[in-house]
Image (cartoon, grey):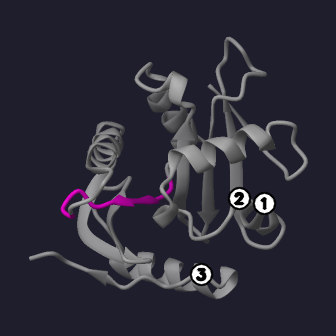
Amino acid sequence: MILKKLTPNHPDIPALKKLFEEAFPESERPVSMDTILNYLDQIPCDLLGVYPDETPDEFSGFFFGIRGESSVYGVYFATRPDLRSTGIGSKAFKAVLEYYDDIPFWFSYESTFEESDNAEQRERRRRFYLKNGFYETGWFAKLNGTEFIIASSKKEFDKEAFEKFMSAMAATSGAALPELYRRD
């Protein structure tokens, strides 16, 4: 799997924007892809295109993550709809984890504990992250009225480091700071 750093003028940006709109419900897109593209020069982040080894010019998906001093927060990861359930997502996700060289990596995904119009999609995402080495931390966050499960690439979740990271990210990007809580 090949990962390429994408820039705002990369020829695959139109395909990326289309995938972004298709893959994520509006509640998970508090900012536009144009805003994310503007972030590339303003905050420590990576927008990586996913390309199969066999067809290195075929845009197949993307990852957008924000880097901290010693951690990464995965904001978006998606593969093209026609390639889902083929194993490419797992291969790409493994490549993303290797790209960050085993540093703590966090992701959040829509909670499967709430009623929703996209319950099947939420459960598929949850299974994907758990199958690919992530652990549910037992912590949740609410953002724009949607509950998210916090997952980690490490079994031990450093809540203080995560909160520090999220505070720095909010201060830098102007994003809302979600409050963490447990569901008991």
Residue type at the position of mark 1: Leu
Instruction: Kindly tell me whether residue 105 is visible in this rendering.
Output: yes
Q: Residue at x 50, y 52 (%)?
A: 24
**Image quadrant for the N terminus?**
top right
The residue wearing badge 3 is 175
The residue wearing badge 1 is 37
How far, Cα to Cα, is label 2 from label 3?
14 Å
Q: Earlier in the sequence, mark 1 or mark 3?
A: 1
The residue wearing badge 2 is 33
Task: Give the x, y percent position of residue 68.
Answer: 60, 70
CB within 8 Å, label 1 to label 3? no
Which image quadrant is residue 11 in?
top right
Q: Is residue 169 above or below residue 95?
A: below
Task: Give the x, y percent position of residue 127.
Answer: 28, 41
Q: Is residue 61 above or below residue 141?
A: above
Q: Residue at x 56, y 44 (%)?
A: 22
Left or right: 115 as drawn, with respect to 10: left
Given residues 10 and 146, the one toward you in this image is 146
Task: Give the x, y percent position of residue 124.
Answer: 31, 40
- Magenta region: which residues? 103-114
**Image quadrant for the C terminus?**
bottom left
Q: Residue at x 44, y 19 (%)?
A: 86
Residue type at the position of mark 3: Ala
Q: Residues within 10 Å of mark 3 (few under 14, many from 20)?
A: few
Instruction: Kindly tell me whether residue 101 is visible in this rendering.
Output: no
CB within 8 Å, label 2 to label 1? yes
Residue type at the position of mark 2: Met
